[in-house]
Image (cartoon, coloured by chain):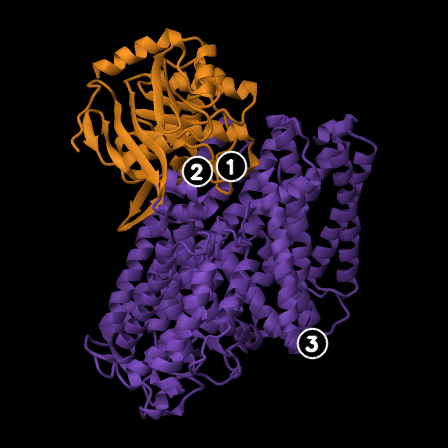
Amino acid sequence: MEYKQQNDNALVDMIDIHKYFGSVQVLRGVDFHVDRQEIVGLLGDNGAGKSTLIKVLTGFHSLTRGQIYFDGEAVDIESPHDARELGIETVHQDLALVPLMSIARNFWLGQEPTYSVGPFKFLDKQKMASESIGALADVGIHIRNSEETVGTMSGGERQSIAIGRAVYFGKKLLILDEPTSALSVGETQKVLDYTIAAKEKGMSVIFITHNIRHVYEVADRFTIIERGHKLGDFYKSEVTETEVADMIVTGQIPERLRLYDEAVGEES
Amino acid sequence: MMQAYLENKRDASNIGTFVTFLTLGFAVLGVVIAYLVAFGWMPLGERANTLRSDINIVETIVVIASLIYALCCARTGIGLLQREKSSLRWSQWMLFITIMIGAAILLSVIIPVGLKFALLLGQDIDLRAIINNDPGVSDLAPLALSVGETLIGISLFLIALLSLLTLMVFIIPPLDVLRRIDGISMIVSPPRRLIMAILVVMAVGVICILIAGAFVVPLYPGMTTIRAADNHRLLAGLLFFLPGLLGYRFVRQVEEESDELRRAIALTPGKYIRSELAKSPSAGAIIGFIAIFMSFTMATDLFLEPSSVASFLSNVATKGIIAIGVTYLMISGEFDLSVGSILGVTALSFMNFMTHGAPVFGVMEPIPAALLAIFVAFILGAINGVLLITTRIPSFIVTLGTMLAFRAITLVAIAGGRILRYSDHHDALPVIGVSNLVFMALVVIGLGIVGFTAYRVLPVWYRQAARAWSIRENNGDFGTTTAIVRTGIFLLTLLVIIIAVVWLVAVFSYHSSAGGGQIVEIGYFGLFNGRVQSIGSEGDFFHMSIPRNANVRLAIVWWFIFVAIFHVILTNTSFGNSIFATGGNEGAARAQGVNVDRVKLQNFAIVAILTGIAAIYETARNPGVDPLKGEGWELEVIAMTVIGGALLTGGYGSVVGSLLGALIFGMLQTGLVLVGIESRLFAGTIGAIIIAAVVLNTLVRGAQRN
């Protein structure tokens, strides 16, 4: 089956994504795109397929069918490492940090700075310590000591570090998977600030949540997934918070929006 | 925090009371130690070896210092009880004196003990003295300034560097902080001369070790009469040093927490101790090691005899090498029950290659046979890893299966399950002829290592010293101590490097004067795991040669070298980082682009290769292999690793921990026999220790989670 990119200017364009786990069809033909410097809220009830869609994009799962375009080119993302090479940074819901490792080591995990002694490469611990503190301070996270283990920190602090790391390393796209689910009100607000900071840095952001209240404030557009299908894309100017919340719960597009959505469907 | 306590604030009273009573306890301790030393219960210095009624200089100093110390402690404690502000000044002195006394006493033990071993190693080591002094090879030429000495020279150089680093870690940070605390609360100028004295003593120690290794020159008076009474001095040193250091760091931490960070939650003593433990994966093992070491040294004089130390080191060296690999694997969240069987297969195939021959190569020489056998081990490890990755079965099941399956190889496939003896097939043990050009090449490599270290380290330490002096100039007289210490370190390093270079050049000129083509013969088995023994007769070398009954094996040296290499890999490379991440949170590691499967596969290969190397050493020690070789080792090695602080669940552990775990294991094995406890209790004791170690680990993890 031949695919072609649908949205020419999009940073990410995922077309006709299918993902089956054995006989379970988790994604059944989802189209999803993210424009440049755009914050997209990816919404849906538990089990709708949001996380699977993102794990396909970040190389955790392989595609059953479909095609991904990144930066205008067709790409095969086969591992998280590939996704990182492309400039995609992800903050996973439960896979963010290693609790028994220090902040600095967590921060640099997978791309540690090294210096060479002959053929051997050793960790540049000074750089690891100073740059992780500096980089986290840039996004407004102040840590005391980069040698502290992550396990000693609160959930909010951990989430902040994971996001700070993603913003620091992310070149093009930042994906936040349920970043606010375990946070207090104040911490949630901080996460939203980081999101905007990332956008101002020139990145696009995918913000996954099933809680519309957290994302409504910052997102430019909402994509709603419902049982493996895409319900639709809605710009913030077109919908109210309540309407989006209803759509997530009921899986139905309100009368007012239905016509518009069908029209879009005919165009493409 | 202590300030708050003195101002009678309620939230600080817990810690304040703790510190107060700790201080008073130290006062009592000081008096007790002064009493013990003064009345001969704890002999120090020369007197340690002889029965005398008078008291010597070392003891006099210690008695007076302990009394002053006790006074300081008492004064501080009482001051704190009455909430006197000035008592903090006393506490500074008290802790400072503690550390200094402790360091002095420890040095008086460490230097002679270090010297003892340095002298042992500095002697002509007979690498040809293979297994139980085999007479058949004794007609070979003695190996003066040979490979053994080159190895030892390099390791002595590393030891000296290490002691310098220890000096930096343990002496300098407290000094810096002392200054800083002084700056904040009061001005007490640290006793500069005392520090200078300590530095000089340490410098003498380092120089002694080096010179002893290089030229064998007696420098330390009284070193001819060193006996097991060193134990008491060690004990006294530790009694001073450890509580002092702990107390000092506690107060320091408390000060930092309150003055600078203003944390909402007050630091309690329990939390403090747990967080201190949490900083090192091998904390439990360190505590266990000190406790067991001290118990045995107190219980019996035989324990520190060279022959006991040699015997327990030799017994655990090969298991310790395997434990390094098992630690790697355990940190990455897996473990391996099949190491015992891999050891059996490797040992048996090694022997088989040399006696019956390998399929393609025929009967092989020992070194190619060893390489091929290690390759066989690597294949077995790779089978483990591939099975785990492809089937996703827990490693417990996979390696349980391969443990039984690999054992079948030794029982059926190789030599029909019979015991293989080298002597049944060959008349003489194998020797290798080495041109002295090889030794010259080794020297050049050694010079390269020394030169490179100098190139990396010297400029940095010089710059630090220069900076310290410039800081001093900008602050009036305020940074003098730090500047002196930093300069001392720079000069000591320079000295160490110069001596190392001189020694290596001497070795080189020896060999070059002997002419290019001279062949030196070394026993193969001796090189792998020979028995190190002095050529001279017992007791004629400053009364310090290795007793004939001491069983010092070369594998011990290999073991320490492996520990050093793998420790650096684990803590200082990105591969090490990914091992920790793989075991700590596999999903997170994968998400950050770590190839988790490859890490696990590599670790299985590392375990297998180290097991293969251990098998070669075992075979070299006793060249007769039975098919059940290594049975039961897997659990012993896992026990060592767990005692050493590695978590079965992964993500935590250290190579140094595995070293300590193996040492604890060995000390118990030998020590229980020496104190006259039935050796049948050994398994039970190890069991209790494992449980204690795991409980400690859980405490550590608890400290890290909250």
Residue B689 lies in quadrant: bottom right
The location of residue B673, given as percent across then percent down, is 64, 77
Q: Is there a contact, CB below 8 Å, between mark 1 and mark 2?
A: yes
Which chain appears purple? B
Q: Amino acid at mark 2?
A: Asn
Labels 3 and 2 within one chain: no
The location of residue A126, given as percent across then percent down, is 40, 37
Q: Is there a contact, CB below 8 Å, between mark 1 and mark 3?
A: no
Estimate the spatial distance between the alpha carbons at disc 1 and disc 3, rounded to whole Å: 45 Å
Identify the chain of the residue marked 3, using the numbered disc in the image. Answer: B
Q: Secondary structure at mark 3?
A: loop
Q: Amino acid at mark 3?
A: Ile
Q: Which residue is mark 1?
A: A150
Depth check, front residue: B593 or B483 = B593
State the hue of chain A: orange
Q: Amino acid at mark 1?
A: Val
Q: Which residue is mark 2?
A: A106
Neighbor class of circle 1 (other Cα within 10 Å; few <14, some 14-19, many 20+) is: many
